[in-house]
Amino acid sequence: MADVLLENVTKQFEGGVVAVKDLQLEVGEKEFVVLLGPSGCGKTTTLRLIAGLEAPTRGRIYIGGKDVTGLEPWARDVAMVFQSYALYPHMTVFQNIAFPLKMHKVPKAEIRSRVEKTAESLEIREFLNRRPKQLSGGQRQRVALARAIVRNPKVFLMDEPLSNLDAKLRVLMRIELKKLQKRLGVTTVYVTHDQTEAMTLADRVAVQFKGELQQYAPPTEVYAHPSNKFVGGFIGTPPMNFIDGKLEVNESSGMISTEEFSIRVDLQLMKSLLKEGDTLPTDVTYGIRPQDCQISTEGGRKEWLRGEVYGVELLGAENVVHVQVGKNRIMIVASDRRLYQMGEAVWVNLINSNAHVFDRTTGRNLVH
């Protein structure tokens, strides 16, 4: 097993497109790290740089403490699992799994033993004589994983391996994949645009945007303490509500004012903000998650804001209510299962100690 280090890595393609910019990333031994971000953020390029399928424009890449920047992919002792499975259709499952061992001239008896043991661990031993077209999507994905595992590589590299599966099977495979990785103890770097996958699989999440690393932390920290507005908006379902306003603070109170209403900053947030002293910006964005908002049909509550129901998403155990408050549309997760009606007058509370205040110019989170 090995750790992975990307030291100030930049990848610039022809035409001046910078896919990865000055990336500093360390993946610990046996750690499961997920590269997360929207399409075009540089996560797949980062994975290909580690694999040796792309060469960095600048920077160094280390695996197990060894500089592998100039090494060919086959010399890096990494195994890749692709979105498309990349199985040979004319080969049996056994032959597909055995292929990398055969290429490394492993003795036949050892190949059979390792393939059967790996297939057993992934519960696909009964399919060893079948061809890929005779398998379901989930079974094919297990074969692709088995082909990677059988090599006993230093590092697993996975590029959205579950994206072709249906929703229910993805959930099952996420659980199996996490258990498998912990059992094998193999350092794993996993690429996805699906935040649910990232939050459930990762020991740490590396959030990328426009080629730059935005935050690198455990999933709970990325969710509860986003480093900037992009991370706050990208992580979480439904997404965080954002309200632009002017921040006014003194030693004991704070207020964010819009053209139509004001939001008092919670005392706990105030303590965080005041640590910044005179450096606090005036133009800010107030961010609060739908789960931290409250909704009521009863008026007259102090500091609650009047709004009108714009729409409702019925999700069973809870509902997402979209409320128009002035020019702002606020999403609220309502757990009371009440059937709010479009156009209905309601009151919402946006004051919560879990809220965030972002610098509107830089996007930086001012809450610590």
Image: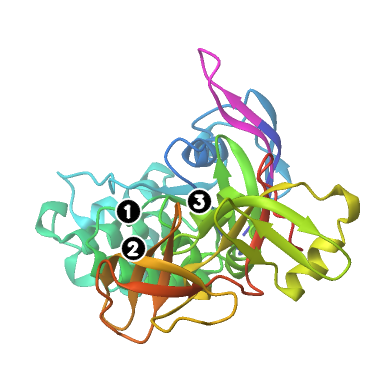
The residue at which mark 2 appears reads as 115
Disc 2: CA contacts within 10 A as few (<14), some (14-19) or many (>=20): many
The answer to whether 197 appears left or right of 301 in the picture is left
Residue 34 in sight: no
Amino acid tagged 3: Leu
Q: Is residue 90 magenta?
A: no
For the residues labelled 3 and 1, the Cα–Cα distance comes to: 31 Å
For the residues labelled 2 and 3, the Cα–Cα distance comes to: 32 Å
Amino acid tagged 1: Ala
Residue 339: image x %, image y %? 25, 80
Q: Is residue 12 magenta?
A: yes
Give the residue at the far front of this rendering: 300
- Judging depth in this view, the residue of 3 and 312 nearest the camera is 312
Segment tinted magenta in the rendering? 10-24
Disc 1: CA contacts within 10 A as few (<14), some (14-19) or many (>=20): many
Amino acid tagged 2: Val
Give the residue at the far bottom of this rendering: 336
